[in-house]
Amino acid sequence: MNAYEDPRITAFGLLTEVHNGLMIRLSQDPAGRGLSAPEFSVLIRLARSPGQKLRLSDLATQTSLSTSGVTRLVDRLETRNLIVREPCPTDRRSAFAVLTPGGVTLVNELAAENVKIIDRWFTGLLDPEQLETFLGTLRVIRDEVHPGATAGA
Amino acid sequence: MNAYEDPRITAFGLLTEVHNGLMIRLSQDPAGRGLSAPEFSVLIRLARSPGQKLRLSDLATQTSLSTSGVTRLVDRLETRNLIVREPCPTDRRSAFAVLTPGGVTLVNELAAENVKIIDRWFTGLLDPEQLETFLGTLRVIRDEVHPGATAGA
DNA sequence: CAGCAATCATTGACTTGTCAACTACTGATA
DNA sequence: TATCAGTAGTTGACAAGTCAATGATTGCTG
């Protein structure tokens, strides 16, 4: 028996295909506002946080990006005036990323579009019970592989 | 109701966290043979194909990479002697990527390690029935978003 | 069978991420 | 309170992907 035929590999491959397939749909962005998935993920996490702000290092853990990756991503969002950096009053090493009003508007527009896409290609394909079961299983795995993540995007 | 709080967004975020989390575990490669996920994916698809060969454009569709991405990936694998390019006898524009004996060996070793990781962080967390249900749901979505994919990795 | 749109692979220019090294600051400890 | 290990963020050098343009070949169509 060859290891590369193991059904567990196929299972993971299936998960990857589903995720990739959905990512591709989501990144097609007909309105052309051009936000990558990690950029959108950062924006939506900020939108959901108290004060629409989060420390860069928290963004790094939540998004599974390296801290330098976050630095550069935040640079890009800042030059587009979607967020601003704000010094942390209690720790001078640290910095917040804060959503601007323009950022709030954009994240809402994009989220609304993404909901349609997700519904068309994922959640809408399943009946409610099947979806709940599916999400329950995902949570089991998530709690094991990535316990640090709280809010999801 | 803000669109960014829609449960469907959260559902997709959950899927992403699971996939990311697993990808990170799989890429840690203690033996340090240094194959990225797409590289491994290409190798395993070749291993499973008749003659251990596949045309570059088929690799592109199966992996969701661009054709130029495949060109460069195949370049890397070729300099490492894991595959060779072979001209297609029936279409002179086209080229096959063919697994070398060394490639076969490596893909088997890596697959065996990956099975352990997948089992530890994914399939082994679920009882058989729960796993089957989960895979069934994944197939429903996969058939919609990525019907072109046959073998999975 | 000549013409031509479509297909396959490659290349150049660019984007976005990583790792390792660095600066600045924090907070526990001797 | 002086030290110093650890943490936050940034930077340089690089890795690996994208898109648009290109060259070669194919196969339908008038």
Image (cartoon, coloured by chain):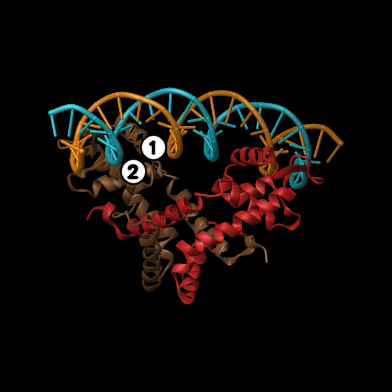
Chain colours: A brown, B red, C orange, D cyan
Q: Residue at x 47, y 73 (%)?
A: B133
In the image, residue A125 sits, relative to residue B105, either above or below, namely: below
Amino acid type, residue under disc 1 in the picture? Gly
What residue sits right under mark 2 in the picture? A60
The chain that hosts pointer 1 is A
Asked whether the viewer can see residue B149, the reply is no
| Horizontal arrangement in the rendering, residue A11 relative to residue A150 (left or right) | right
Q: In what element is the residue under mark 1?
A: helix
In the image, residue B41 sits, relative to residue D2, either above or below, namely: below
Answer with the quarter of the image where residue D9 lies: top left
Q: Quadrant of the N terminus of chain A?
A: bottom right
User: Quick one: B52 or A68, which is closer to the camera?
Assistant: A68
| Residue B144 image point, x, y percent | 51, 61
Answer with the quarter of the image where residue B75 lies: top right
Q: CA distance from mark 1 to mark 2?
A: 8 Å
Amino acid type, residue under disc 2 in the picture? Ala
Q: Residue at x 38, y 57 (%)?
A: B12
| Residue A141 image point, x, y percent | 40, 63
Q: Earlier in the sequence, mark 1 or mark 2?
A: 2
Answer with the quarter of the image where residue A96 lies: top left
**What mark, if any, has residue A69 been given in the picture?**
1
| Horizontal arrangement in the rendering, residue B80 relative to residue C13 (left or right) | right
Q: Residues within 10 Å of mark 1 (few under 14, many from 20)?
A: few
The answer to whether the residues at label 1 and label 2 have Cβ atoms under 8 Å apart is: yes
Q: Residues within 10 Å of mark 2 (few under 14, many from 20)?
A: some
